[in-house]
Image (spheres, rainbow, N blue to C red):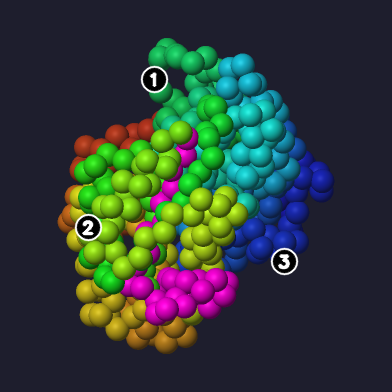
Amino acid sequence: MSTPFDRLGPDLVTTDPEVVASFARDEAALGVQGGAGGAGPLAVVSPRSTADVAAVLAIAHEHRVPVVVRGAGSGLSGAAAAPDGSVVLSTRRLARVLEVDPVERLAVVQPGVVTADLRAAAAEAGLFYPPDPGSVAFSTVGGNVATNAGGMCCVKYGVTGDFVLGLEVVLADGTVARTGRRTAKGVAGYDLTALVVGSEGTLGVITEITVRLLPAPGPARTLVATFPSLGAAGAAVAAVTRAGLDLSMLEVMDRTTLDAVDRLTGMGLGADGTPAAMLLAQGDGGSAAAVLEAMAVLCGDAGADDVVVADDAVEGEALLEARRQALPALERLGDWILDDVCVPRGRVVDLLEGIERVAAAQALTIGVFGHAGDGNMHPTIVHDAADPASVAAAARAFDAITSLALDLGGTITGEHGVGRLKRDWLARELDPGAMAMSRAVKAALDPRGILNPGCVLEP
């Protein structure tokens, strides 16, 4: 089948149906929430340079062909689910670390660089790139920027967007633009960098990213506390938050998640009976010991069954790996939908207890894990996709949890993005004025509506 992109040559373009199908979606549970289907995309284009990307978009603009950008495909919101008749633009060949500057404390990378590789390159220069999503070993920096991804270090260091200094972006008609700066300060003009960060491929295609780096922190220390109930764990989180402890990480896993991780890894997390919840915390730098000592007291006051501080770095890393295995472990229980909601830190207890009620009401298994330190939880709804009744119950649970987050003063997504999975929820969170502004920005930068149509906003 011929396409308008054939002129770019077979080195950049493939129309092989099996290859195209493998690039046509991400990890979102679109079987429950809707998504791509039918004939699928026309082709996959894998550019090698910014000039190649500009050529792709110029052709797409001319022929009004939708373009969906795809990194590693690890997204969980359906943003990379390519609609019929579109072209998938893969960033897999744009994968070089272009520069690490230890004087200015910055790095310049292409979007296809794996996040762990950027962190390693920074570490070689004695520096630190904090964003640490659970998919750090395989997600790409471009995808992290496109969704403004978070991770386990957010409680202290913030999300991806807090480290993006500047971007090179190709606009819908093929125009190449640079936003931001390389200097420590700079406020000239509108903050176009922040506008593109988190836009999920709907405003332009990112081809180069300049990120801020930090001095490497001191060795981390890890604390683990187990609790007889989710409420007790939530009370500990509230107490730690009120105390203002300088933690670099504060994660939570419930009993369902701990059981699943234990079965997957054999780590013995439930050797003496699986606790209702576990908090996993880290402190880094010179104050780490004092910070974790103070947290241990607060956990005890909240009713913790057991509190242990791991001084050994190997043991601490093993515990972190248990947290990273939360979603892979829950995936083994059946079909799943991963939610991503964020509430004020003072309402974490209400969210956790509300999710328990939803699970009981729908007679479903819902594993809960997430970033307790900033209120960002990932309820994972396990169901049977072959059973219509189970699918319907899962959809009801998803809606109930998302609605609960809004009712608690939270947001429908803390780090995974809106994508297609939560597009219909955006209008419930934003007021009519904010929705009008969003549509005006989209229309101005993508007047023909070719950039990831149906993602974030209605096409």
| Mark 1 residue type | Tyr
Tell me how far mark 1 sits from mark 2, CA to CA. 48 Å
SS for callout 3: helix
| Residue depth check, mark 2 versus mark 3: number of the one nearer the observer | 2
Amino acid type at circle 3 is Glu
Q: Residues within 10 Å of mark 1 (few under 14, many from 20)?
A: few
Marks 1, 2: nearer the viewer: 2
Identify which residue, 241 or 299, lies in the foreground: 299
> Residue at the location (44% across, 25% down)?
192
Residue at 65% over, 21% down: 101
- Left or right, 2 with respect to 269, comes to right
The quadrant in which residue 185 appears is top left
Structural crowding at the residue carrying mark 3, measured as other residues with C-alpha within 10 Å and reported as few (<14), some (14–19) or many (≥20): few
Element under disc 1: loop
Instruction: Name the residue tied to disc 2.
Output: 301
Q: Earlier in the sequence, mark 1 or mark 2?
A: 1
**Secondary element at tag 2:** helix
Of residues 9 and 230, the one drawn nearer to the viewer in this rendering: 230
Say left or right for 233 vs 9.
left
Residue at mark 3 = 18
Please provide the residue range marked out in magenta. Answer: 256-285
Rendering coords of residue 241 (x, y %): 26, 45
Find out whether residue 366 is within the magenta segment.
Answer: no
Marker disc for residue 190: 1
